Amino acid sequence: MGSKNVLLIFKSNIMYKPVIYRLAKDFDLIFNILEAKILPKKEGRILLELKGSENTIDEGIKFLEQNHVVVELLSDKVWLEEEKCVNCGACTGLCPTDALSMKRPEMTVSFDVQKCIACGMCGLVCPFGAMRDITLFDPFAEGRSNSK
Amino acid sequence: MSEFKINKTFAEINKKIRDGSVVVVNAEEMIGVTNELGPIEAARKVDVVTTGTFGIMCSSGAFLNFGHSIPRIKANKVFINRVEAYAGVAAVDCYLGATQTREDDPLNKVFPGRFRYGGGHVIEDLVSGKKVKLEAFGYGTDCYPNLRHEAEMTLKEFPDAWLLNPRNGYQNYNCALNLSKKTIYTYMGILRPDATNANYSTSGQLSPLLNDPYYKTIGLGSRIFLGGGVGHIIGNGTQHNPNAKRSENGVVMGGAGTLSVKGDLKQMSPKFLRGASITGYGCSLNVGIGVPIPILNEEMALFTSVSDDQILAPIVDYGLDYPQGAGGPLDYVSYAELKTGEINFRGQQVITSPLASYSMALEIADILKDWIKSGQFLLGEPQDTFPSVPFSGFNSIK
Ligand code: SF4
Ligand code: SF4
């Protein structure tokens, strides 16, 4: 059994087309919705955890792509840039899933992309921009300007 | 007659550094040494304990002399990469503060602001060897007629460039949480409502002033590791307060002593001087500092063997109390507890994260240890001490 976190982008023309259920039905994949956001009339974004054999995961992804869903591997989109990280640990207390965690007693920080739900929090916290491109579902990307 | 069994001087320790016989451990290792041997034997064996810290230190900046233009200029406005440096000093001198934001920065207009580039970032770019853009404006005088001077420069081309920080290395600091009902963005990081998470800074048992709590060996003239190069302590820092509350072992229970430091920027490295962007708060600079502490006697052996479970930080509410300058510590918590990642506050589990890097602090203490062992780094004996308070001595030194 393997597992991959993928970001699915549905453009407006296919936004309401039912395709995800077929991952279970036709490919025997277990999927878990980690995060979803629909911008009305624009696009929908879903972060899915796919579980199954390596082969079926790949086939499932191919199927989605044939149905015009843009599929991106989360591990290609989101990573910790070690050069920039100072292992301060500031991000670890705010990461909702423990994708960022502290190794003890060394007090160094590790990032497990399989736990990441791309919530964007570490991107806000890290003073050095060490978490790359965590803006897939950035909760502050819009609508915050009037709220102070 | 001295009250101590072991008595060493700076000169004796420096002689050992020169002949290669010096024994140096870091402040984490010293805990074990003293536990095993007792303070007297520990003081006999160990000559120097190295400390370290690497955290956001807002009261930092660079004092720069950018050299004369032709014709000459008396600059009264200076910008480096569009970040303003204070120019109200001599003709081509200026001070670039770590928290100064860029001219066109949106600040907190769209809250929380990101503060992507400021004084701290310019300093990091300078020590990285990157070209920066200098813009100086003058009003014209008979001796300095030039009105405007622009240049692309690297650090090497500045005749003088110092890191000059009025307040660094706080002896101890708050553990911040938020009792209000909304998420807040502070210099102590992002704090969720209802005390969901708590942040703390300082490197605890590795932190310089926590290992010399009465400033007996650290003073004006101490030679230190600063930003990857060699620097000096030039006095106590601003807001230095030796009168802070202390626990029985003499350890301060909150912010107390501070350091003012200076060093040649040209020796420093971007690994230990990092521009920081603190969401909703502003720009700053992470500074790496390492201070060597000479073990002159068994008292210093005891001071330097302080461990995280003996150091308490005050828990402070940044939601309501701190901004209003009201209230006091809600409770005290040890660094040993803070480092587990979770504390108990009023019966509630609160997630904790550090803001200063302990692993980098350890790396700094170890680099300093290597410098001293190799004979290239001699201790600087303080020419003056900091304001302090009396210490009645440890009850039993055996
Ligand atoms: S906040 Fe940034 S620098 Fe600090 S541990 Fe997290 S990723 Fe690394
Ligand atoms: S985006 Fe960052 S904070 Fe959010 S889950 Fe992933 S690692 Fe954690």
Image: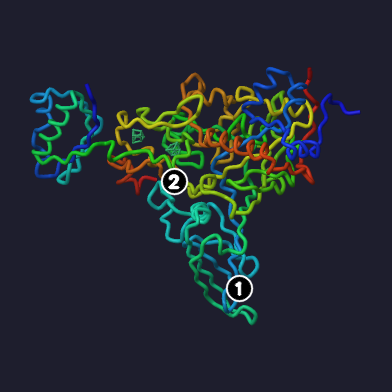
Amino acid on which disc 2 is placed: Gly
Dot 1 falls on a residue whose secondary structure is loop
The picture places residue A25, in percent across and down from the top left corner, at: 9, 24
Please report whichever mark, 2 or 1, sits nearer to the chain's N-terminal start: 1
Q: Residues within 10 Å of mark 1 (few under 14, many from 20)?
A: many
The picture places residue B255, in percent across and down from the top left corner, at: 64, 36
Asked if residue B379 shows in the view, the reply is yes
Amino acid on which disc 1 is placed: Lys
Label 1: which residue?
A: B74
| Residue closer to the observer: B341 or B63 | B63
Furthest residue toward front: B19
Q: Quadrant of ligand 2?
A: top left
Quadrant the C terminus of chain B occupies: top right
Q: Is residue A46 left or right of residue B365?
A: left
Q: Residues within 10 Å of mark 2 (few under 14, many from 20)?
A: many
| Residue closer to the observer: B25 or B383 | B25
Furthest residue toward right: B1
Q: Quadrant of residue B321?
A: top right
Residue at the image point whose x is 16% and y is 46% from the top? A42
Dot 2 falls on a residue whose secondary structure is loop
Q: Chain of mark 1?
A: B
- When the figure is inspected, residue A3 is found, relative to residue B191, above or below; the finding is above
Label 2: which residue?
A: B280
Q: Chain of mark 2?
A: B
Distance from mark 1 CB to nearest ligand 1 atom below 8 Å: no
The picture places residue A91, in percent across and down from the top left corner, at: 43, 35
Mark number displayed over residue B273:
none
Asked if residue B320 shows in the view, the reply is no
